[in-house]
Amino acid sequence: MTAMKTLIATLALGFAAFAQAGPQVKVVGEGRPVLMIPGLASGAEVWTEACAALQPGVQCHLVQLPGFAGSAPVPNEPYLEAQRDALRAYLKDKGLSGVDIVGHSLGGNLALMLAAAEPQQVRRLVIVDSLPFLAALRNPAATPEQAKQMGAGMRAQMKSQGDKPMPEAQHKAMAQGMTRSAEGQQTLVRWGLASDPATVAQAMSEIWGGDFRPLLPKVEQPTLLLGSWAAYQPMGATLESTRALFERQYQGLKHLRIAMSEKGFHFLMWDDRDWLAGQLREFLR
């Protein structure tokens, strides 16, 4: 009987630890709460400079998503829904209301999910270089069902590589198209190598295979979309054509303002930091 009690206690501790696992949040400053969510395989510190630019008067809640940039993974599937629910619980646990949410890339999808799920708690929304239907980038005529198939295929291909991270050379090549900053490129490689391959595969399959457009009519909050285009200029993209793409994808969102960076790549918080900081300060005041 004693052995059985010990086993039950051990299992209980294990479940308690699992229940507490998930996003980690670092709080910086005092004032109006702003939840800042990074993108795929990114660290929470991607928002450090943007948070500093909002001071004083703002309390930044810097989110580190599990499985990314060296943080411990959690066996949650689907990944985005689990993180949305964990962040909803965090807002309620901390008694936060009138929260502004800033999300980059995958974090932008999560920001949409949170705003749609918590209309009373979320005040304003900033989406940084994120699309609600990524599959249309590869195939403008893609259907939601085709997107699901694409995401599933992507996940299967990545998982077939096992637990090994993507080769460093491949991370370096990808980073060059993500940011102009040499230091930022090194950081992206470090984060990518430290991210859990299974988590990245699952999360990537969800953003490429998902269709977040049905959420848009549910988002009542004023929303600012900050877009980049310069990295795609060699492939024929222009500021005007990229802005039109954002407008088409977000046409279901009622209270939307779009601002386009003149020079930044995907990581606008590094490539066009003063512009991004100014946009945040003006919109979140």
Image: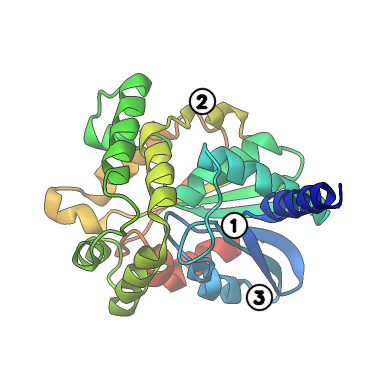
Q: Is residue 242 left or right of residue 35?
A: left
Question: Which of 220 and 198 lies nearest the eye of the viewer?
Answer: 198
Residue in front for this viewpoint, 186 or 156: 156
Q: Amino acid at mark 1?
A: Phe
Q: Secondary structure at mark 2?
A: helix
Provide the secondary structure element on which disc 1 rests: helix
Residue 283: mark in rendering: 1
**Of tags 2 and 1, which is closer to the observer?**
2
Locate residue 12 relative to residue 28 in the image: left or right. Answer: right
Q: Earlier in the sequence, mark 1 or mark 3?
A: 3
Q: Residues within 10 Å of mark 3 (few under 14, many from 20)?
A: some
* Amino acid under disc 2: Pro
Sequence-first disc among 2 and 3: 3
Q: Quadrant of residue 117?
A: top right
Exactly how many numbered labels are in the figure?
Answer: 3
Under mark 3, the amino acid is Gln
Q: CA distance from mark 2 to mark 1?
A: 25 Å
Badge 2: residue crowd in 10 Å (few <14, some 14–19, many ≥20): few
Residue drawn where x is 64% and y is 41% of the image: 115
Residue occupying image coordinates x 29% and y 45%:
158
Q: In the rendered image of this protein, does residue 178 appear above or below residue 190?
A: above
* Image location (x, y in percent) of residue 75: 54, 46
Q: Position of residue 251 (x, y in %)?
A: 45, 30
The image shows residue 54, relative to residue 78, as above or below, that is below
The answer to whether any part of residue 233 appears in the image is: yes
- Mark 3 sits on what residue? 55
The label number, if any, that marks residue 214 in the structure image: 2
Helix, strand or loop at label 3? It is: loop
Could you tell me residue 274's position as x and y percent? 45, 73
